[in-house]
Image: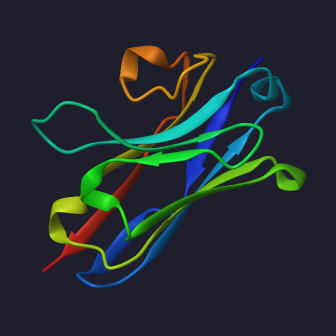
Amino acid sequence: QVQLVESGGGLVQAGGSLRLACAFSEGTLSTIYMGWFRQAPGKEREFVAVRRTTGHTTYYTNSVKGRFSISRDNAKNTLYLQMNSLKPEDTAVYYCAASRSTNPPVRANEYLYWGQGTQVTVSS
């Protein structure tokens, strides 16, 4: 069984940092990629970053390159999203997700499993 539980969201001023965490169950180890998405009010869910389960392959959406970093600690069964230099436009609910796609998945429908989301609010 795959379970994903996000944490670490909150309110931060523009220019600040947050680190999101996604605790995943052992069943997630059968997936190939794990990623982060976000959804702002009135907008579609948007790809943010993805990391292959094994190795170090990562991909980011252009708007977060150089500011966000996705990492994984297998000993703790946790996926992270380090977010620096935050901007008001980063405000959204952030979701952790897992995929069995063999190619780097950047669309929401390529992911089988989702967490419940954590709110990130960046004030100007």
* 3 relative to 38 in the view: left or right: right
Q: Residue at x 29, y 74 (%)?
A: 86
Q: Position of residue 50 (x, y in %)?
A: 51, 41
Nearer to me, 32 or 82: 32
Spot the residue most to the right.
Answer: 75
At a point 85% along the width and 30% down the height, the residue shown is 26
Residue 40 position, x and y percent, is 20, 45
x, y percent for residue 77: 80, 47
Above-or-below relation of 23 to 105: below
Numbered circles on residues, count: 0
Locate the N terminus by quadrant. top right
Eyeballing the image, is 42 above or below 64? above
Depicted 58 relative to depicted 21: above or below:
above
Q: Nearer the viewer, residue 99 or 88?
A: 99
Residue 52 vertical position relative to residue 3 in the rendered view, above or below: below
Q: How is the image coloured?
A: rainbow
User: Which residue is found at the position 44% from the left and 62% from the top?
Assistant: 9
Q: Is residue 47 left or right of residue 118?
A: left
Q: Locate the C terminus and report the quarter of the image it occupies.
A: bottom left
Q: Quadrant of residue 31?
A: top right
Residue appearing at x 32%, y 60% in the figure = 64
Q: Which quarter of the picture shows residue 107? A: top left
Residue 41: x and y in percent read 15, 42
